[in-house]
Image (cartoon, rainbow, N blue to C red):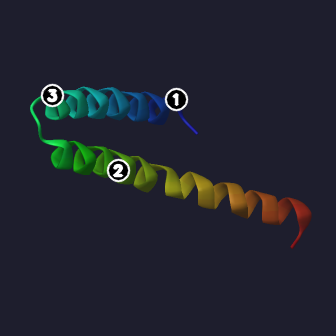
Amino acid sequence: MSITIIFKIAAVGILVSVLCQVLKHSGREEHAFLTSLAGLLLVLFWIIPYISELFNTIRDLFSL
């Protein structure tokens, strides 16, 4: 895993939190929720290959 993915996740987290705060203060709670959900899904799509690689490594380690 490279360090760039950690920086990308941190950048998305900061951006989503700022956007959510702005949207909540402007009275758009629904949009704030959808923004946070979109950020979560984006990060999950980035992490899925690493999780798959982890499970493959564990399976190979224990020869299952």
Callout 2 crowding tier (Cα within 10 Å): few <14, some 14–19, many ≥20: few
Which residue lies at the image location 75% right of the left edge and 58% below the top edge? Answer: 57
Task: Find the distance from the CA under tag 3 to the CA under tag 1.
Answer: 34 Å
Query: Disc number at residue 3?
Result: 1
Q: Identify the amino acid type marked 2.
A: Leu
Element at badge 2?
helix
Mark 2 or mark 3: which is in front? 3
Query: Disc number at residue 25?
Result: 3
Q: Identify the amino acid type marked 3.
A: His
The quadrant of the image that shows the N terminus is: top right
Task: Find the distance from the CA under tag 1 to the CA under tag 2.
Answer: 17 Å
User: Between residues 43 and 16, which one lies in front from this camera angle?
Assistant: 16
Element at badge 1?
helix
Query: Farthest residue in the left direction?
Result: 26
Coordinates of residue 3 in the picture (x, y in percent): 52, 29
Callout 1 crowding tier (Cα within 10 Å): few <14, some 14–19, many ≥20: few
Callout 3 crowding tier (Cα within 10 Å): few <14, some 14–19, many ≥20: few
Which residue lies at the image location 89% right of the left edge and 69% below the top edge? Answer: 63
Coordinates of residue 26 in the picture (x, y in percent): 9, 31
Q: Which residue is mark 2?
A: 42
Coordinates of residue 17 in the picture (x, y in percent): 30, 30
Asked which quadrant contains residue 55, the reply is bottom right
* Rendered view: 42 above or below 19: below
